[in-house]
Image (cartoon, rainbow, N blue to C red):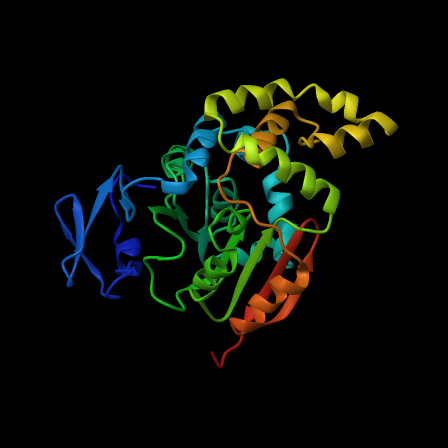
């Protein structure tokens, strides 16, 4: 990644308002309709602030490298990516890929390592963390933008993926359709969202979220840290069942992931849950077929029909 907007990214960018291309004007971009886009640290900024995703700006500054494969002894992100893609990761080589909600860049790093040209998009200031994490990858470019108003033309990307992001937007279906519209005919859309199947868990966590989403992030973060040792208590058969039903926390074996995931659950303003049938209807509405259901939560992939 370079410190300026590269020509390949500039060629992809389109004004979300008029659909026109951008031209460089000093340290800004401008389209024919006159809308100006600031560029800071080499990243086009299509939003003025991080709006409803401030918790993610906070979260990824605290855990900038926790889930990054290059900073870990295990390739967890690579394994997760593989399980959701339904094809060898070598398939990514030479593909133009959009990471829709890239966060600090964990999956963009995987795609870049396998030879994809990656554009990472995120609404939050986690995009700056991603820039630091991905600075060694010249095949990665980043934009800060709202996924519901993406700065790209329709049918641009070979693959659009959004892992654990859409359910944190005000309308997950609307966000999905905006992302899916960027996939080329014959291209692939892959995503996962939270499921609504575990009613007891959903009821309990939603009960607590009515409080936790109102707390200052720093206070909530330390409360989530204090819950980390509950993992050992929750690992016991009877006590664990009761505990996880009354006060759900992450059960990741790594304490750093546990802290991060618990905060990630209780802090976001928006958090929706879905079913496979519901998500499949989104894919079909957007003109996708060859649907694949992956492991964990509601994980799905589809191929866009050539007649779209």
Q: Which residue does the image show at 48% across and 51% down from the upper left?
A: 115
Q: Residue at x 76, y 21 (%)?
A: 232
Considering only vertical position in the picture, is 192 above or below 232?
A: below
Direction from residue 21 to residue 182 in the image, left or right: right
Q: In this view, does 73 lie above or below 17?
A: above
- Residue drawn at the location 26% of the way across and 55% of the way down: 10
Does residue 227 lie above or below 287 as drawn?
A: above
In this picture, residue 174 sits left or right of residue 209: left
In the image: residue 242, left or right of residue 192: right
Q: Where's the N terminus, which quadrant?
A: top left
Total marks shown come to: 0
| Position of residue 209 measured from the top left corner of the image (x, y, whole percent) | 58, 35
Residue 269: x and y, percent?
48, 40
**Quadrant hosting residue 49:** top left
Closest to the observer, 307 or 282: 282
Depth check, front residue: 127 or 123 = 123
Rendered residue at 66%/21% (across/down): 228
Q: Quadrant of residue 132?
A: top left
Residue 11: x and y in percent read: 27, 60
Question: Residue 233 at x, y = what percent?
Answer: 78, 21
Front residue of 93/196: it is 196
């Amino acid at each position: 990644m370079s410190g300026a907007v590269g020509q390949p990214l500039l060629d992809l960018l389109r004004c979300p308002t008029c659909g026109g291309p951008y031209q460089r004007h000093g340290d800004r971009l401008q389209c024919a309709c006159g809308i100006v886009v600031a560029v800071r640290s080499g990243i086009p900024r299509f939003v003025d602030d991080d709006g409803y995703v401030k918790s993610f700006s906070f979260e990824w500054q605290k855990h900038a490298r926790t889930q990054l494969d290059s900073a870990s002894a295990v390739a967890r992100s690579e394994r997760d990516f593989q399980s959701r893609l339904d094809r060898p990761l070598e398939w990514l080589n030479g593909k133009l890929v959009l990471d829709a909600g890239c966060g600090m860049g964990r999956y963009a790093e995987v795609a870049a390592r396998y030879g994809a040209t990656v554009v990472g998009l995120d609404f939050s200031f986690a995009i700056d963390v991603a820039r630091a994490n991905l600075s060694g990858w010249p095949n990665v470019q980043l934009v800060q933008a709202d996924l519901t108003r993406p700065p790209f033309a329709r049918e641009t990307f070979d693959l659009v993926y959004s892992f654990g992001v859409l359910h944190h937007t005000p309308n997950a279906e609307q966000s999905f359709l905006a992302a899916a519209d960027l996939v080329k005919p014959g291209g692939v859309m892959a995503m996962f969202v939270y499921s609504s199947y575990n009613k007891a868990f959903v009821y309990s966590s939603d009960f607590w979220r009515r409080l936790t989403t109102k707390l200052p992030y720093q206070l909530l973060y330390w409360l989530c840290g204090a819950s980390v040792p509950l993992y050992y208590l929750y690992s016991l058969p009877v006590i664990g069942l009761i505990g996880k039903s009354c006060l759900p926390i992450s059960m990741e074996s790594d304490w750093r992931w546990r802290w991060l995931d618990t905060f990630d659950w209780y802090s976001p303003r928006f958090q929706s849950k879905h079913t496979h049938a519901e998500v499949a209807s989104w894919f079909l509405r957007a003109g996708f077929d060859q649907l694949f259901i992956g492991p964990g939560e509601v994980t799905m992939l589809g191929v866009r029909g050539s007649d779209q």
